[in-house]
Image (spheres, grey):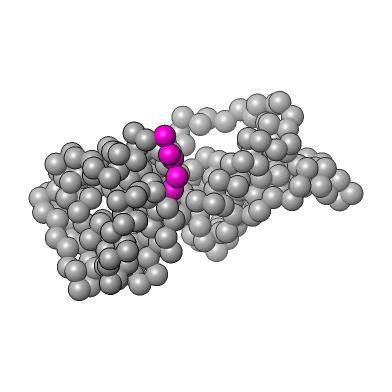
Amino acid sequence: MKMRQSIQQQLEESQPGTRAPIWVNDVDVSRCQNCNNRFRTTIILSRRHHCRCCGRCVCGSCSTKKLTLEYCKTEADVRVCDTCYTRFTGHVLTKNSSIWPKATRDVDRTILFGDFRSVSSGTIVWIALQEDFQLHVFGAKLDEAEDYCIILSDLRDLQFEADTRKFELKEITKNHSFAIDSNHQITYPKSDFIDEQLKTVDSQLTFYANLWYETMQLARSTTLPDWYIRKRDSTDSGVSNVG
């Protein structure tokens, strides 16, 4: 993700506070980008804060500190997240991080990542199919902690309706139904094989829907796609973003 890479680059490579950051779009996160706790949905408690140093979207508990930053030093001290405060001052804030939701998004081990519509609720979720052969379901594009996961090898059945691009995943105790909409966004390791396939298809959307289905079916038998293995084991680490 370009925005994600930009923010990470600012955190790791640049001097903090020397330039105004790019703010993360509120719609791209449903959880605090520091502690991974879900933002409240009630009107009174739903306010989010953007760190004036890195631009990440964080909760009030993770942005209690203020600093004077170089790019806005003529103004009053501005709100920063705990991560930037520690990096800027060297002072580690004491937090009980053991109770925070665990980050499960692993970009380096992700085969496919994209947005789906939950058929039951109508809401958009983001799904990462990772090397652990699980579908990690996130509430928003940049969330690091999942809402839940689906172990593909444990499914009783997996059905795909090509006309509606709808997936029916049946667990022992629960069923899931997701659909790919016309504005589908997908990310995957750049692949010459996929690039060649795309040159001959009539509909990219249909191709990507089939790619999801085929990759899910392989994951049910704990098998990685050949195109992914070749890419993972090569020296080229490019990523393709579509949509």
Quarter holding residue 211: bottom left
Q: Residue at x 76, y 42 (%)?
A: 17
- Is 191 drawn above or below residue 176 in the view shown? above
Magenta part of the chain: 235-239
Q: Is residue 69 left or right of residue 93?
A: right
Quarter holding residue 160: bottom left
Q: Residue at x 57, y 30 (%)?
A: 95
Quarter holding residue 166: bottom left
Q: Nearer the viewer, residue 150 or 219?
A: 219
Q: Nearer the viewer, residue 29 or 187?
A: 187
Q: Residue at x 28, y 72 (%)?
A: 202
Residue furthest to the right in view is 74
Where does residue 150 sit, x and y in percent of width and height? 24, 47
Q: Is residue 232 left or right of residue 91?
A: left
- Is 27 drawn above or below residue 51 in the view shown? below
Where does residue 187 sit, x and y in percent of width and height? 40, 53
Q: Residue at x 37, y 65 (%)?
A: 184
Where does residue 136 sit, x and y in percent of width and height? 32, 47
- Is 136 drawn above or below residue 92 in the view shown? below
The answer to whether one can see residue 141 in this image is yes
Where does residue 208 sit, x and y in percent of width and height? 29, 61
